[in-house]
Image (cartoon, rainbow, N blue to C red):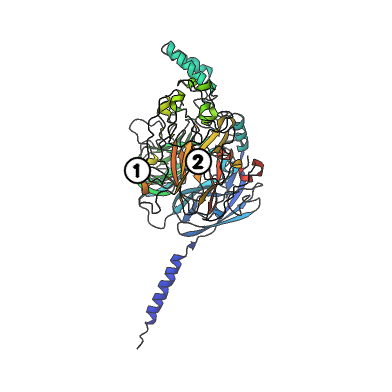
Amino acid sequence: MMITKPWCAVARSLLMSLVLIALAVPALAQPIDLVLEQRTVNFNGEDRPAVTVNGQFPGPLLRLREGEDAVIRVTNKMQEASSIHWHGLILPATMDGAPGFSTGFVRGIGPGETFEYRFPVVQSGTYWYHAHNLDHEQRGLYAPIIIDPREPEPFRYDRQHVVQLSEWTDERPARVLQNLKRDPSYYNYNRRTLTDLLRDLRRAPDGDAQRAIIQNRIEWGNMRMDPTDIADITGATYRYLVNGIRPETPANLLFRPGERVRLRLINSGAMTYFDVRIPGLKMTVVQADGNNIQPVVVDELRIAVAETYDVIVEPREDRAYQILAETMDRTGWARAQLAPRAATPPAPLPPHRARPILTMADMYMTPGPTGLDRGTPQPETDRPGQVAPMGGMNHGSMGSGAMAGGAAPDHAAMGHGAAAAPAQPPMAMDMPMDHAAMGHAMPPAPVQQGGANGPGTPPATTAGGMSAHAAMGHGTMADPLTQDTGAPPGARVLSYRDLRPLRADPEFRPYDRMIEVRLTGNMERYIWSMNGNEFWNAQPIVARLGERLRIRFINETMMNHPMHLHGMWMVPELGKGAFNPRKHVVNIKPGTTQDVDIIVDAEGDWAFHCHLLYHMESGMMRIFRVVRDGAPVAAAPRQTSAAMPAAHSH
């Protein structure tokens, strides 16, 4: 005899089925409306045009939740096309918001138009959004994003604050770029003068020291560079902000003594690296670029352009604590303060630490092409005027013995010089050079980084590989991961080596292939490029969906470059295997080499660029094209700057 369930049991079963279905389908979040408008701001005594979001500068905080489907409607009430890119978010290429890359988003959001972004929220943490064009991003179109996790967070805090770092200039961004094209040191007010030379000569202990000073000045003059050239744009024109507020009247971020306070640090600057410290407090770093890490206690950290770090602090005294963000070139401050009361007055700003000075030991000998695949559909060579072969350097002028032919030092080889000769023949990355022909001893074996290496490919080197600078009599090669903030002895400064995820990466495996991406440029002409080709003259980098691609970044310039790939995670090779961290920005220090793995899991065309805004606009950007196996791959048509999308024209 068939026995049927009681009606209540049937109802309970049906209800459970409906609950399971509801859990399987992402919840549709409440739609968010953002309106882009031009309004005026006044930071330096005169009204200047800015870009606001819903009338706010910077824009309003967006709060999303992991597992939901976000719906964000953006209306452009300005007279020019604009855009919003969701920095660090993993989403479909059509919703990424980079004009000229995202399908159906060639020109961005036109005047009077509304574009609806709709995408699943598949992550949590601290991120930000910004325009993807020079004029609007530099003039204020940026704001924070907080994505609340589906599961409880692995750390405890009592309250939280966003600390969004940025800059403002009264000049129109196009004029700033024009000034840099005319004179790349236009904003460097720290350049050494005749007065500095006379002062140094007076302080010299003897004639030998005086002659060395004069010779040093001649060497720098021959290269048409100044050792104080640390940042392209300095406090001479920038005003540095926290949450849109100048350091003279900082925002008071409230706390009660004894609370654990989470600070969500976001560097939304266009061009500025900040060294962050809170005198009197340790910072426990718990997230990097939105991803949880094993907590690490530090005294200071350097935050590259576009990075985010979440830190927890525990202020115990009933007093204000200064959140100090000093620019890397020591020309300005951004500041907020943790305060027990809203009316707490600010303390005086401390004096700046000593400004960094480049030395001849810092001058990197550019390796040129190394012979690795570049990932382009057709073979690619450096364009004239971007880089120079090794033989173009006059080592005699650097105190290391004369090169054959005694050629003048070609500064383009370091990202700071004039037009170069044709590129040298390809060379293997880790193959030793014939340094005897250059008047140098053979270099020591490069220091190896650990980690999984694919078959038939060389391991990474800590810096420079074949061009071991120490072997050329110029001092020790830079460590690609250590940050020198000028912290006092004993202070702990955050390094990428400290970033270790809480759990092993479930997608970790040895990489499938390696390509090289050389960061190249000509500072004297303010040209920036990747593999010796500016964006509008370059082919796409092509990856296959599902592969793990290793990129060997080789920075041939004397500038830091925060490299950002849209739509996919970047995993710097730190020798930790499955415990290497995932990041959306990886900073590549001057004159160093760093291997970075890409988890290629998103089909389409994506922007791949240096996040220094004026470097990107000057050509340091590529299309990163992800295709399925068997799909035809064609080289992108050559573009001129006039043919580029409005958001990227210069």
**Residue 37 drawn at (x, y percent):** 61, 47
**How far apart are the alpha carbons under marks 2 and 1?**
31 Å
Question: Is 502 in front, or is 387?
Answer: 387
Residue 328, above or below 3: above
Q: In the image, what residue occupies the spot 64% across and 48% down?
A: 81
In percent of width and height, residue 615 lies at 55, 37
Specify the amino acid type for callout 1.
Val
Element type at mark 2: strand
Q: Nearest the camera: 184 or 489?
A: 184
In the image, residue 79 sits, relative to residue 119, either above or below, namely above
Quarter of the image where the N terminus is located: bottom left
**Disc 2 marks which amino acid?**
Val
Q: Secondary structure at mark 1?
A: strand
Callout 2–callout 1 Cβ contact below 8 Å:
no
Picture disc at residue 296: 1
Q: Quadrant of residue 204?
A: top left
The residue under label 2 is: 517
